[in-house]
Amino acid sequence: MVHKAHPPARPVRAFRFDEHIVRRCDVVVVGGGAAALCAAISARRSGASVLMLESAPKALRGGNARHSRNFRIMHDGPTPFIQGRYDADDVRSDLRRVTGGRMDDVVADRLIGESAGIVGWLSENGVRFQDAGDGNLPYSRKTAFFHGGGKALVNALYETAARLGVDIRYDSEVYWLDLGEGLAPSVTVRCLDGEQVLSAGAVVAASGGFQANGDWLRECWGAVADQIVTRGTPHATGTVLKGLLDLGAAPVGDAGCGHMVAVDARSPRFDGGIVTRLDGLAQGVVVDRDGRRFADEGSDIGPTRFSVWGDRVARCAEGLAFSIFDSVIERRFRPSIFPAIRAGSVGELAVALGIAPKALEQTVGAYNAAIRSGGGLPDWRTEGLDPPKSRQAAPIAVPPFGAYPVRAGLTSTQLGVRVDERARVLDRCGIPMDGIFAAGVIMAPNVIGRGYLAGIAMTIGAVFGRIAGREAAAHARR
Ligand SMILES: Cc1cc2nc3c(=O)[nH]c(=O)nc-3n(C[C@H](O)[C@H](O)[C@H](O)COP(=O)(O)OP(=O)(O)OC[C@H]3O[C@@H](n4cnc5c(N)ncnc54)[C@H](O)[C@@H]3O)c2cc1C
């Protein structure tokens, strides 16, 4: 298959990297997050010269990984970093359950198999993990936690990459890829000083999704796109993803899907990170701008309870909802990083939120009247209410009353390029595109084409980053 497309016309001011770097570059890694770092280190350790191009400035390097804290790994028994046992069949069946089977079994099996050794590999490359038995972590047999969080992981991997001799360039956005028609592929990069075309033995695309690209989101999601915030990096614009698709890479996943959670509506447009997530939606009630409930708040009270609310809230008028509680309920969940809006009565609270007081009073009154409180709190539920609250239906009765404004926070989009188990990007005929590899969110929908599994994103980045780097180095040598 011929892969050909034309770069977007734009004025070019010539700029050159040092000649020796360009000439000796075996592998170009596009991106600066966890997947890119693992690819760069792996390629360098495999003997390749590596140039890493990160569009963010140094202070914002690391993509979404700097917001992360744990990842999911297969293991056959306890280790200092993870408890219990979570074997390959367990991981596979969790993946199958959340994706409804929308996964490539071969790619998923490679991920699961290599996840077993990824803690050791990351440790060798400077990442530290939290001791599972130190009493500071909740029991977890599925995920290991990064000591110091994602920021520490990113800093450690950058340090290792630099020490190994990876040439790291910040403020360097790749906006065009050329496949070289059987010769070396090349990328066109825009830096602070101008633009340059760089050729390489192989290119690893590790530039994430398109969750920060408002225009593309609007094209796929409609007006909803303007109502959401992006939880992570503003640099995930999907430029390279789009370029690869235009060049004939096979798409995988769904442009209309993304992973979203409930966040405080006062969060910044980008990079709010983990602290803006709202925890207590299942405890009280959630209403829209008209003061109406629109979902069963008790339907999901497990550890991933925030992830069901992203889609729900995004569909509300103006993409806005309100989590409503009283002073008793408020003690049962972690507060927002922003202060609660409070009032002495439900009517006054409605006024403070811009909701018609009668509407909210009626919603809360009907909800309180419908509660059947037998057994423990988890079993309290409503009867005869539509929508019902099927669990944790505690009355909203003791002032002061409180509320948080809620918006959907987008973690990442779920459209990617198809790869094989060697991280080679495949075209629409299933043929590897010569010298082009992908790792991380840009290929994650091969494994998780739908749904959400906590911690799997960082595993995909680390495992396929490592594989892509190794394979790209081998390709460049050939
Ligand atoms: C708040 C938050 C918390 C999270 N917590 C977890 C967690 O605990 N566990 C977990 O598994 N996952 C978590 N995730 C998801 C996880 O962080 C990401 O899935 C993972 O970091 C993705 O890695 P990546 O390298 O593929 O992409 P990204 O992190 O999106 O990195 C993409 C990189 O490419 C660069 N880039 C983009 N376009 C270009 C271009 N054209 N040229 C050059 N560079 C470019 C960007 O600057 C960026 O550095 C979290 C995400 C968020 C937002």
Image (tube, rainbow, N blue to C red):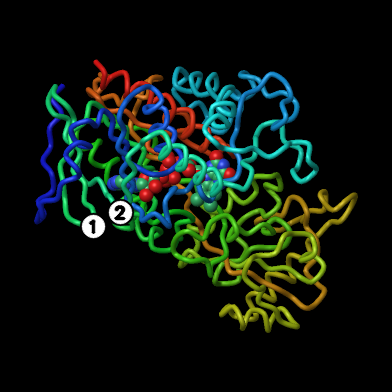
User: Where 323 falls versus 75 (above or below)?
Assistant: below
In depth, the one of 407 and 387 nearer the eye is 407
Q: In which quarter of the image is residue 5?
A: top left
The tag on residue 411 is none
Q: Name the residue under label 2.
A: 171
Q: Quadrant of residue 431?
A: top left
Which of pointers 2 and 1 lies earlier in the amino acid sequence? 2
The residue at the point 84 percent across, 53 percent down is: 377
* Residue 85 screen position, x and y as percent: 72, 23
Task: Mark 1: give few (<14), some (14-19) or many (20+) Cα within 10 Å.
Answer: few
Mark 2 residue CB less than 8 A from any atom of ligand 1: no
Q: Is mark 1 on a helix, strand or loop?
A: loop
Q: Identify residue type, mark 2.
A: Asp
Q: Residue furthest right?
A: 375
Q: In which quarter of the image is residue 444?
A: top left
Q: What element carries label 2?
A: loop
The residue at the point 72 percent across, 36 percent down is: 140
Tell me the distance, in whole angstroms, between the alpha carbons under discs 2 and 1. Answer: 6 Å
Q: Name the residue under label 1.
A: 192
Q: Identify residue type, mark 1.
A: Leu
The residue at the point 55 percent across, 29 percent down is: 124
The residue at the point 34 percent across, 56 percent down is: 222
Mark 1 residue CB less than 8 A from any atom of ligand 1: no
Q: Residue furthest top?
A: 478
Q: Splitting the image into four quadrants, where does ligand 1 fall?
A: top left
Q: Is residue 328 left or right of residue 129?
A: right
Image marks 2 and 1: residues in contact by CB distance under 8 Å: yes
Task: Mark 2: give few (<14), some (14-19) or many (20+) Cα within 10 Å.
Answer: some
In depth, the one of 231 and 295 nearer the eye is 231
